[in-house]
Image (spheres, rainbow, N blue to C red):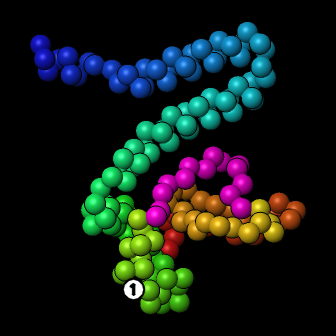
C-alpha cells in the first residue's frame, strides 16, 4: 500500500516541466518554427528546469553565520583550495578571508555558447569553473585557452 504509493508517486515539478515541454513543442509545430530553434528552446527549458532544481540554496540565507560558513565550506572549499596553493590567486590568504568569500559564492549556470565576459568589459565577479569548461577566445573567435573544471 503505502510503500508502493511512494515508489510510483511522480515528482510534481518534473511532471509540470514535462507538460510545459509538450505544450511548447505543440506550439512550435503549429507555428512551423525551424527545427534548429526548436532544439535550442528545448535545451534552454531543460537547462532552466535543472538549474532551478539545484538553486534551493537561497533558503540558507536565514541560517546563522557560523552555519552558513560551514555549508559554504562543504559546497565550495574544494574548488577554492585549488587556488590557495603557492603561486595561485589566493595563496597566503587567511581562513577568515576565504570564509567571507565562500559565503558570498553562488552557482551561475551558463549555457553552452553564451559569453561570460567580453573583451574590454570590466568584470565585477570572480568565476570558478565547477563543471564543464570555458573557452577563452580572441577577437577573431579563435580559441586561445580552455579552462576546465577538472584541472587545478
Q: Residue at x 67, y 30 (%)?
A: 41
Tell me the quarter of the picture where residue 75 sits.
Answer: bottom left
- Residue 92 locus on image (x, y percent): 44, 90
Image-based side of 68 in relation to 100, left or right: left
Relative to 99, does residue 114 appear above or below in the rendering? above
Magenta stretch: dominant secondary structure = loop
Relative to 3, does residue 98 appear above or below in the rendering? below
Q: Residue at x 39, y 86 (%)?
A: 94
- Residue 115 locus on image (x, y percent): 72, 54
Q: Secondary structure at mark 1?
A: loop
Image-based side of 125 in relation to 117, left or right: left
Instruction: Tell me the magenta residue range.
Output: 104-117
Is any part of residue 46 visible from this angle?
A: yes
Image-based side of 14 in relation to 117, left or right: left
Image-based side of 39 in relation to 92, left or right: right
- Residue 98 locus on image (x, y percent): 41, 77
Quickly name the residue at label 1.
94
Amino acid at each position: 500500500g503505502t510503500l508502493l504509493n511512494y515508489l510510483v508517486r511522480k515528482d510534481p515539478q518534473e511532471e509540470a516541466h514535462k507538460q510545459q515541454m509538450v505544450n511548447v513543442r505543440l506550439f512550435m509545430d503549429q507555428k512551423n518554427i525551424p527545427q534548429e530553434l526548436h532544439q535550442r528552446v528545448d535545451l534552454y527549458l531543460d537547462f532552466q528546469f535543472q538549474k532551478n532544481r539545484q538553486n534551493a540554496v537561497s533558503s540558507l540565507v536565514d541560517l546563522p553565520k557560523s552555519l552558513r560558513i560551514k555549508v559554504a565550506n562543504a559546497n565550495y572549499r574544494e574548488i577554492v583550495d585549488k587556488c590557495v596553493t603557492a603561486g595561485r590567486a589566493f595563496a597566503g590568504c587567511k581562513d577568515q578571508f576565504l570564509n567571507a568569500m565562500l559565503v558570498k559564492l553562488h552557482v551561475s549556470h551558463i549555457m553552452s555558447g553564451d559569453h561570460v565576459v567580453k573583451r574590454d568589459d570590466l568584470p565585477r565577479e570572480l568565476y570558478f569553473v565547477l563543471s564543464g569548461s570555458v573557452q577563452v577566445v580572441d577577437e577573431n573567435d579563435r580559441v586561445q585557452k580552455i579552462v576546465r573544471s577538472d584541472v587545478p
